[in-house]
Amino acid sequence: MNGFHLLQRHETGRFASAISNAEPYDYGSSKCLDVEVGDVDISLIFLKGMDVPSLAELKGIFNDLPLLDEQVSRLTRCRQHFETTGNEYELSYVEIESPEHLALFYCGVGVNAQWGVEFERDCEGKWEFSGFC
């Protein structure tokens, strides 16, 4: 779809299981958690000294990732970039600033390219696109 290798909704349970096997580690002043399922691996980076959330909170984030990933693939600017360059992208890592603010970062498949998209939770707890980073 639009040159994106999307996360599959049916795999969220597999990611949730893989979370419990992942060990957090220091990444500069941040904490990092690498989660792998099959040939997909995603790093969660918790910024600004944020502690790694509870297992339940992490599962909630992974349940939301496929929907956010699909939303990114439908953004006009992302579609235009794919149509112009022909480059394909996959979700590489997620930077989490707080439970209400995160950014998804994409890397090119077979090309040296990286960019990100920020989301914030609204007052009802739904993720809203807040810009490119």
Image: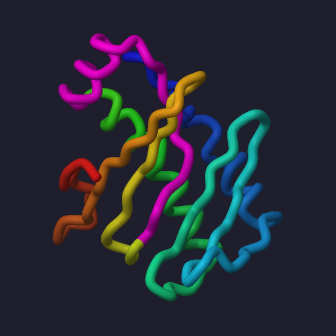
| In-front residue for pair 99/14 | 99
Instruction: Give left or right: position of 3 versus 131.
Output: right
| In-front residue for pair 48/51 | 48
Residue found at the far right of this picture: 21
- At 36% from the left and 47% from the top, the residue drawn is 116
Q: Position of residue 60 (x, y in %)?
A: 51, 62
Q: Does 127 sit above or below residue 72?
A: below
Residue 127 in sight in this render: yes
Instruction: Give left or right: position of 31 versus 132.
Output: right
Q: Position of residue 75 (x, y in %)?
A: 23, 31
Q: Position of residue 70 (x, y in %)?
A: 38, 33
- At 50% from the left and 85% from the top, the residue drawn is 50
Residue 53 in sight in this render: no
Residue found at the far front of this picture: 112
- At 78% from the left and 65% from the top, the residue drawn is 22
| In-front residue for pair 89/66 | 89
Point out the stretch of residues depicted in magenta: 75-96
Q: How is the image coloured?
A: rainbow
- At 57% from the left and 62% from the top, the residue drawn is 44
Is residue 10 shown in magenta? no
Instruction: Give left or right: position of 44 versus 103.
Output: right
Q: Quadrant of residue 80?
A: top left
Is residue 84 shown in magenta? yes
| In-front residue for pair 46/99 | 46
Q: Does 108 sit above or below residue 18?
A: above
